[in-house]
Image (cartoon, rainbow, N blue to C red):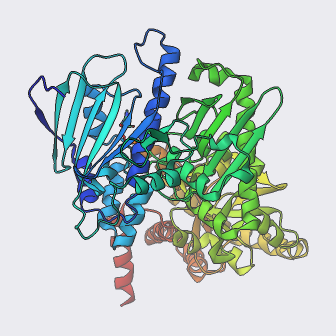
């Protein structure tokens, strides 16, 4: 190949450099995966070319014999994977190969640094999937020659993976991309296979890439042998499920998802008749690094009659199921469909509705059929699924049905709402919950006291999304959700009620003076001071009005830069507590004692601390408290 211009040396982006170091000192044991990545990229490149040539009739591309070719040269110790697909321009090579654009990379690298042992690191690498760079597990130098279809000049890229790469134009590069690996010497300690052996390569292709719908050609045995196609090329989703092994599904999953680990569940769907389509979907076994990042993508690809149309097809899956991977192949769409058209398309909307229902029902079956699998699913994706409670009105009940929540019933095991409802006490009207920042803050909060004493189960909701959906979703199975930190609580049975009503009235009368005075003394901070029926051991707690924002939500909104008026809450006092009865007596005896206002302030501060809240003026609180303590000495 004739070199026509000077060689330029460029640096890898720093994340890419770190990742390459990992590959060079590869701690990843399944090195065969490098070939799967190269073939997967080549197949994508062919898909892209076919699509682009459909859409752009002027594209000067050769689409006559699209295929992948693999060549080995035992003497030179090289392995080449070649495709005549879309290729890359110089800019694309620099952007796509010289950097990692994948969101969550920084996060991944941090986690990797923190990983305790090799097994943990392997696991992380598997979750992240490193694509093209996997070549450096087996090669000490990689050469890539590529020419973008429709352009005249090609590019030659080369690197040993050590910080820099070279790049130069080449004139006579064929359309598409050829990646040549200069394999590491055989005698290095971690060299497990001979990747120059055609038999070995054929075996790996069969195992990992059989379903690739483009021919993968290799020269047969013997000097003059013709190249033969080694893969069966059958689209997996179009074959009957009895014909396809679990392993094949798993490898296909890795191809579409770029994940290196097996999926948790495989979901097949077929529709015949006027609008025919097939779907092959997967639930991954772990959340991707970018599940909660803004640049996140959806994982379902659209095909039309076996032709790849687009990645990240947002019309096919709602945002809250963005982690679902796979393909949908629709028979009756035009190959020219755009994202905009898809959004309006009634058939696509029907497919989407069915996909959603199928995913939700699969998870529901999993709950009873394989509890361990469900637990993994919920741990990884529950937070995303719960977003559907806000977004997907139609499936709200089904989403609640497959959700599970931490609860006071069992510290170890989350509960489903169905199980909660089955355990509800006689006469219990509501599903009780409390939101907060951590399990311990919620469990130790004073609001919990009466519920614990009376044996009512409370859901412990600590995800930020929980704060949102509890306000939007009225109930489950006809039972309303009720926060234990909001509004009035009423935990008494009908008979008890009559007896306590009289006592309550008397109490209210007895405390009237104290409540009114405290309401004024603390008027800047609280909306009302009243007696509580939710406390047993604490003197006081703070509750919100039924429709007020919770403190966590208030904090979230403020963090997002929203202007909010200060939200005043209600201070509830425990009429049985010595501090409260004592304060009442002191106030009756010495209504003008200024020290009592300070006690009221301390009482409020304690209630705030007890629920894990933050004092507005901690130094003042400490000064008042120290003053009180001094007097006891
Ligand atoms: P991933 O495939 O996960 O995106 P890779 O590191 O394997 O990551 O590849 C990065 C990008 O480089 C690909 O997304 C693709 O755009 C481009 N690329 C890689 N191999 C090829 C190829 N054979 N032909 C065209 N483009 C390629």
Image position, residue 57 (x, y; %): 48, 10
| The image quarter in which residue 217 lies | top left
State which quadrant residue 393 falls in.
top right
**Picture residue at 40% right of the left edge, 50% below the top:** 35
Quarter holding the N terminus is: top left
- Identify the residue at horizontal 40%, vertical 26% (top origin): 86
In this rendering, position of residue 226 left or right of residue 77: right
Towards the viewer: 207 or 487: 207
Q: Is residue 340 above or below residue 501?
A: above
Quarter occupied by the C terminus: bottom left
Task: Choose between 266 and 235: the one closer to the eye.
Answer: 235
Q: Nearer the viewer, residue 378 or 203?
A: 203
* Residue 608 in picture, x, y percent from top left: 49, 65
Whether residue 394 is visible here, answered yes or no, is no
The answer to whether residue 60 is seen in the rendering is yes
- The answer to whether residue 18 is left or right of residue 108 is left
Residue that sits furthest to the bottom in the current view: 633
Numbered marks: total: 0
Outermost top residue: 58
**Residue placed at 31% from the left, 56% from the top?**
109
Q: Residue 580 at what x, y percent from top left?
A: 59, 76
Q: Nearer the viewer, residue 614 or 62?
A: 62
Q: Is residue 167 above or below residue 480?
A: above
Instruction: Classify 173 as above or below 582.
Output: above
Which quadrant of the view contains residue 526? bottom right
The residue furthest left is 6
In x, y percent, where is residue 100?
Answer: 31, 43
Residue found farthest to the right:
495
The quadrant of the picture showing ligand 1 is top left
Give above or below for 73 relative to 43.
Answer: below
Q: Going by the image, does 473 lie left or right of 262?
A: right
């Amino acid at each position: 190949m004739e070199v026509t211009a000077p060689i330029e040396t460029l640096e890898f982006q720093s994340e890419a450099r770190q990742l390459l170091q990992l590959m060079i000192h590869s701690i990843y044991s399944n090195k065969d995966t490098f070939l799967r990545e190269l073939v997967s990229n080549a197949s994508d490149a062919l898909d892209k070319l076919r699509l682009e040539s459909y859409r752009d009739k002027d594209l000067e591309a050769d689409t006559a014999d699209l295929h992948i070719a693999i060549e080995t040269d035992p003497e030179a110790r090289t392995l080449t994977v070649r495709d005549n697909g879309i290729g890359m321009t110089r800019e694309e090579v620099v952007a796509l190969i010289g950097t990692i654009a994948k969101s969550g990379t920084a996060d991944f690298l941090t986690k990797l640094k923190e990983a305790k042992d090799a097994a943990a690191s392997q696991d992380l690498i598997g979750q992240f999937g490193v694509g093209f760079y996997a070549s450096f597990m087996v090669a000490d130098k990689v050469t890539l020659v590529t020419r973008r279809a429709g352009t005249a000049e090609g590019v030659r890229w080369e690197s040993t993976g050590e910080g820099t790469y070279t790049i130069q134009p080449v004139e006579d590069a064929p359309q598409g991309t050829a990646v040549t690996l200069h394999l590491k010497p055989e005698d290095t300690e971690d060299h497990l296979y001979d990747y120059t052996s055609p038999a070995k390569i054929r075996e790996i292709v069969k195992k990992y890439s059989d379903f690739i719908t483009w021919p993968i050609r290799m020269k047969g045995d013997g000097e003059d042998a013709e190249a033969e196609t080694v893969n069966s090329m059958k689209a997996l989703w179009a074959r009957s499920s009895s014909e396809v092994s679990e392993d094949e599904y798993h490898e296909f999953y890795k191809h579409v998802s770029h994940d290196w680990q097996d999926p948790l569940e495989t979901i097949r769907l077929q529709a015949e008749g006027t609008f025919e389509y097939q779907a092959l979907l997967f639930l991954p076994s772990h959340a991707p690094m970018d599940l909660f990042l803004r640049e996140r993508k959806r994982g379902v690809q659209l095909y039309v009659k076996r032709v790849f149309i687009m990645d990240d097809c947002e019309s096919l899956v709602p945002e809250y199921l963005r982690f679902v991977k796979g393909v949908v192949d629709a028979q009756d769409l035009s190959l020219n469909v755009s994202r905009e058209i898809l959004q309006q398309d009634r058939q696509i909307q029907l497919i989407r509705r069915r996909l959603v229902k199928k995913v939700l029902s699969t998870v529901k079956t999993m709950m009873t059929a394989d509890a361990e699998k469900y637990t993994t699913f919920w741990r990884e994706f529950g937070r995303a699924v719960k977003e559907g409670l806000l977004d997907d009105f139609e499936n709200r009940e089904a989403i609640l049905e497959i959700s599970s929540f931490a609860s006071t019933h069992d510290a170890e095991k989350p509960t489903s709402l169905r199980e909660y409802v089955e355990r509800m006490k006689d006469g219990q009207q509501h599903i009780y919950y409390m939101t907060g920042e951590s399990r311990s803050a919620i469990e130790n909060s004073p609001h919990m006291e009466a519920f614990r004493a009376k044996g009512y189960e409370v859901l412990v909701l600590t995800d930020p999304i929980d704060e949102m959906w509890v306000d939007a979703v009225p109930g489950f199975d006809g039972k309303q959700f009720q926060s234990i930190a909001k509004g009035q609580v009423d935990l008494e049975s009908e008979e008890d009620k009559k007896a306590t009503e009289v006592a309550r009235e008397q109490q209210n009368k007895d405390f009237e003076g104290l409540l009114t005075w405290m309401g004024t003394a603390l008027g800047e901070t609280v909306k009302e001071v009243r007696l509580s029926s939710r406390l047993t051991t604490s003197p006081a707690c703070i509750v919100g009005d039924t429709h007020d924002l919770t403190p966590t939500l208030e904090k979230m909104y403020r963090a997002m830069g929203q202007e909010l008026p200060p939200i005043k809450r209600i201070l509830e006092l425990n009429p049985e507590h010595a501090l409260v009865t004592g304060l009442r007596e002191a106030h009756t005896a010495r209504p003008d004692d200024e020290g009592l206002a300070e006690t009221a302030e301390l009482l409020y501060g304690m209630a705030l601390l007890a629920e894990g809240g933050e004092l507005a003026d901690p130094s003042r609180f400490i000064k008042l408290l120290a003053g009180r303590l001094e007097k006891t000495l």
